Image: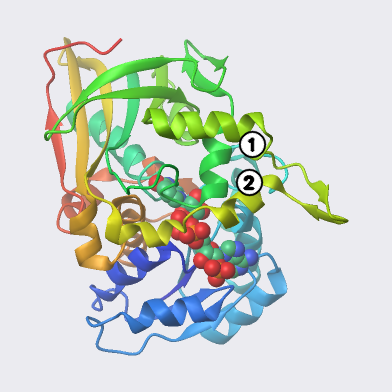
Amino acid sequence: MNRILIIGAGGVGRVVLHKCAQHPEIFNEIVFASRTVSKCDAIVADFKDFPKTIPTESVDADNVDSLVDLFERRRPDIVVNVALPYQDLTIMEACLKTGVNYLDTANYEHPDVPKFCYAPQWEMHERFRDAGLTAILGCGFDPGMTNVYVAYARKRLFDRIKTVDIIDCNAGDHGYPFATNFNPEINIREVSANGRYFDQGKWIETRPMEFKRVFNFPDGIGDRDIYLLYHEEMESLTKHYPEIERMRFWMTFGQSYLTHLRVLENVGMTSVKPVLYDGKEIVPLQFLKALLPDPASLGPRTVGKTCIGIWAVGEKDGVPTTKYLYNICDHQASYREVGAQAVSYTTGVPAALGAKMFLSGQWQGHGVFNVEEFDPDPFMNEIGSWGLPWVVETPDVAFE
Ligand code: NDP
């Protein structure tokens, strides 16, 4: 009897819930919790495809005692944390106190200091190991699927990988002049930070959006501008694959998005430092989040596709080899299936399959792990039928 507890009733939580509900043979019991229980109830009320009732719960995931109380009452085998990165450590603490396994999709962040680093979670490795528990970190798309792609490429397509470029394209159009496809606060913190990439054992820092290329995406998407960003999976991948000499992360942005972002930055609206307004402290970025469209509301109006993948260069059987491994996901097809656009879909599907990998014993180990530390084969064999099929191409052009 497997019991899963999903925390976070946002766009991603909706997808995880749907995908788990589609597999009752694995997820025999599902509990859905969030700070605002009415959001869980509204998502559950949309359900037509799950034969059993899904209990919902209110929990403050910033508070370890509140989490411990919930875990003790519901006794889950695994918690899937799709709340915010701010809650990673409290949820992991509660898991340790109650003997529950853990999975998330984004590394811990402190609300006041955007850092994008795994250290605070990696430091819990011995405690999870000694408790005989498993914590799976970063099991969304990027991080998540991209880490599995690298592990699979290294296992099946290369004898040695020299360079990896992770390329994330959202060619969707929601019709708003400015909106973010997942939590605005987390998204804007990520894209307004300095860029960084790994080269010959060193991290090279760049200004935000300093490096730009044009990349020709498959499946009719065509040429798009991509910009170099720092992204958290590079930290774990360069640690676990020391042979990789250079790793970069690129993301598409349209001109309208960048112009709005520049203006918002220039007037201080993206700052996480509290300011006094009318005698009250407010955080400008949190106020901006309140003004922007809720990402969960973008589903019905977003058309187009996402294309996220890795471009790897190395050797196979002594021959120089290049492979481009990617997924295409259609926003409207995702919406029809689960009521969420493709950015939530591409995050929630790997999280649900990662939980299945753990519950079915295909991913095992005591401690704290990034997904590339597990066998990529069972995940790659199943992810297509779960909704995210992949393609491997052997490009005849270079990407410098
Ligand atoms: P949303 O903001 O839509 O949803 C987050 C949910 O978490 C909200 O419903 C909110 O609750 C809940 N929440 C926030 N704080 C608390 C708390 N203290 N206690 C309980 N619940 C809380 O975000 P998304 O669904 O877009 O993203 C979810 C996660 O997925 C984020 O961590 C994001 O970084 C990650 N992500 C990962 C990606 C990847 O590829 N790896 C890509 C995209 C996102 P409520 O509404 O009930 O108040």
The relative height of residue 386 versus residue 258 in the rendered view (above or below) is: below
Q: Nearer the viewer, residue 139 or 39?
A: 39
Task: Judge left or right: residue 363 versus residue 318.
Answer: right
Q: Residue at x 58, y 31 (%)?
A: 263
The relative height of residue 139 versus residue 257 in the rendered view (above or below) is: below
Image position, residue 397 (x, y; %): 16, 12
Q: Which residue is mark 1?
A: 115
Q: Amino acid at mark 1?
A: Lys
Q: Residue at x 61, y 73 (%)?
A: 98
Image position, residue 300 (x, y; %): 28, 61
Whether label 2 lies within 8 Å of ligand 1 gets the answer no
Task: Judge left or right: residue 396 versus residue 370.
Answer: left
The relative height of residue 374 versus residue 94 in the rendered view (above or below) is: above
Task: Judge left or right: residue 280 versus residue 233.
Answer: right
Total marks placed: 2
Q: Amino acid at mark 2?
A: Glu
Image position, residue 288 (x, y; %): 61, 49
Is disc 1 placed on a helix, strand or loop?
loop
Q: Nearer the viewer, residue 372 or 294?
A: 294
Q: Nearer the viewer, residue 196 or 215?
A: 215
Q: Which residue is mark 2?
A: 109
The relative height of residue 70 versus residue 353 in the rendered view (above or below) is: below
Is disc 2 placed on a helix, strand or loop?
loop
Which of the two discs, 2 and 1, labels the residue nearer the N terminus?
2
For the residue carrying disc 2, how many other residues have a C-alpha within 10 Å: few (<14), some (14-19), or many (20+)? many
Examine the image and state in which quarter residue 256 appears: top left
Q: Nearer the viewer, residue 148 or 294?
A: 294
Cα distance between the residues tagged 2 and 1: 6 Å
Q: Are marks 2 and 1 in contact (CB under 8 Å)?
A: yes
Q: Residue at x 55, y 46 (%)?
A: 186
Q: Residue at x 35, y 71 (%)?
A: 17
Q: Is residue 82 visible?
A: no
